[in-house]
Amino acid sequence: MLKECRKHDYWDATYEDSMNLIASLPQVAAHIYRRTYHNGDIIAPNPEEDWSGNFAHMLGFEGIDFKSLMRLYLTIHADHEGGNASAHTVHLVGSTLSDAYNSFAAGMNSLAGPLHGLANQEVIKWVFEMIETLGTRTPSDDQIKKYVQDTLDAGKVIPGYGHAVLRQPDPRFVAQREFAREYIKDSEIVNIVWQLFDIVPPILQGLGKVKNPWPNVDAHSGAILVHYGLNEYSFYTVLFGVSRGLGVLAALCWSRALGFPLERPKSVTSEWLKTQLDK
């Protein structure tokens, strides 16, 4: 236990837990996938593969292209900045000196929210619903424009568009688009994603109140996974979670090594709130 060692050694136990957890995450996630969608036909790990390639193997995908996709996917979905909800949750819980397992579990509960990690599932679900409504997998630009406008008129958002911080196309979206251009030819679902990239931003800009009309990382990931046959979009957030472990657990080790204090939210008085309202 951490309390039994000197404070400047806390990082050591956290590093060991983090490495064990990162090593286990792909096998745990693949076990869930095979048990849930493939009748419990579990695939043993292949020690000859790298971390991402072994994960693809245990999921049941042996193609070289898909393994390349997993290397990209697991890189770009790792913790990209500490301000997102799941990364912050890991940091917050970890600041109590809770171990890596508890801290990571807390972060995954945060990732499961529809405004965060669950969004990647919502995007592909929305695309499938559009295809069903329009009755075609090769819609015209005008058909997509109308469907997007109908979605907005119904008081709904366009999944995968907008970001609280970014004010330009998400570089993670761009990375996936470049991958698709190199490895994927004539995918109807991917083509729809590219049509949306051309169509949605001008419509959102026309509303006059959207700060960022550009696609985020979630806007593209599902279409590529569907192309390779990973159609079970309820699993996509689990993939996100495996990746996020790389970043948040590395950050947790640094928090221990640098001796970061217990994080406390700022408290304000009623009088302070009244003053702010007066301003």
Image: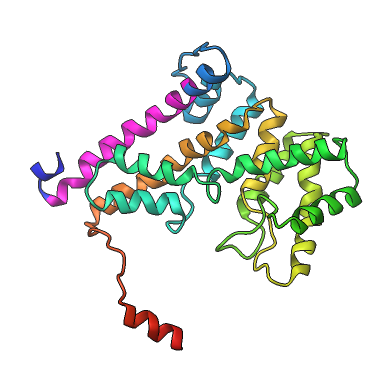
Q: Quadrant of residue 215?
A: bottom right
Which residue is depicted at the point 63% across and 55% down? 170
User: Per the image, is 265 magenta?
Assistant: no
Magenta highlight range: 7-31
Which residue is depicted at the point 21% across and 57% down? 259
Q: Is residue 242 left or right of residue 128?
A: left
- Where is residue 177 shown, x and y percent of the image? 71, 45
- Where is residue 184 shown, x and y percent of the image? 75, 34
Kindly tell me whether residue 49 is visible in this rendering.
no
Q: Is residue 200 above or below residue 137?
A: below
Q: What secondary structure characterizes most of the magenta part?
A: helix
Q: Quadrant of residue 269?
A: bottom left
Q: Is residue 73 above or below residue 79?
A: above
Looking at this view, is 223 or 116 the one in front?
116
Which residue is depicted at the point 67% across and 44% down? 123
User: Per the image, is 22 magenta?
Assistant: yes
**Image quadrant for the N terminus?**
top left
- Where is residue 145 shown, x and y percent of the image? 85, 54
